[in-house]
Image (cartoon, rainbow, N blue to C red):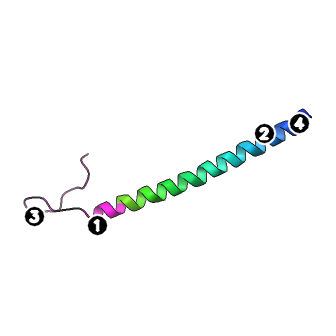
Amino acid sequence: MVPLLLVLLLALLLFGAGFALKALWWVAIVVLVVWLLGFVARGTSASGSRGRWYRW
């Protein structure tokens, strides 16, 4: 009975890790798109040059 529970626990753990990794991939893609859009949509400064859209 214990080996069966260990196998089920391992399967549940791997399923949870797989779901979390898939969700993290989607988050990474969204952040990448926002980051790339920042380069396209950045404004101009008072001197007319294109500045950075982030502060750091």
Q: Which is more foreground, mark 3 or mark 2?
A: 2
The answer to which of marks 4 and 2 sits earlier in the sequence is: 4
- What is the C-alpha distance between the residues marked 4 and 2? 10 Å
Stretch of the chain drawn in magenta = 36-56
Q: How far from the left and from the top, in percent, is residue 9?
A: 78, 39
- What is the C-alpha distance between the residues marked 3 and 2? 60 Å
Element at label 2: helix
The answer to which of marks 3 and 2 sits earlier in the sequence is: 2
- What is the C-alpha distance between the residues marked 1 and 2? 47 Å
Q: How far from the left and from the top, in percent, is residue 21?
A: 60, 50
Mark 1 highlights which residue?
A: 40
Q: Amino acid at mark 4?
A: Pro
Mark 2 highlights which residue?
A: 9
Quarter of image, res 46:
bottom left
Element at label 4: helix
Element at label 1: helix
The answer to which of marks 1 and 2 sits earlier in the sequence is: 2
Disc ID at residue 52: none
Q: Amino acid at mark 3?
A: Gly
Mark 4 highlights which residue?
A: 3
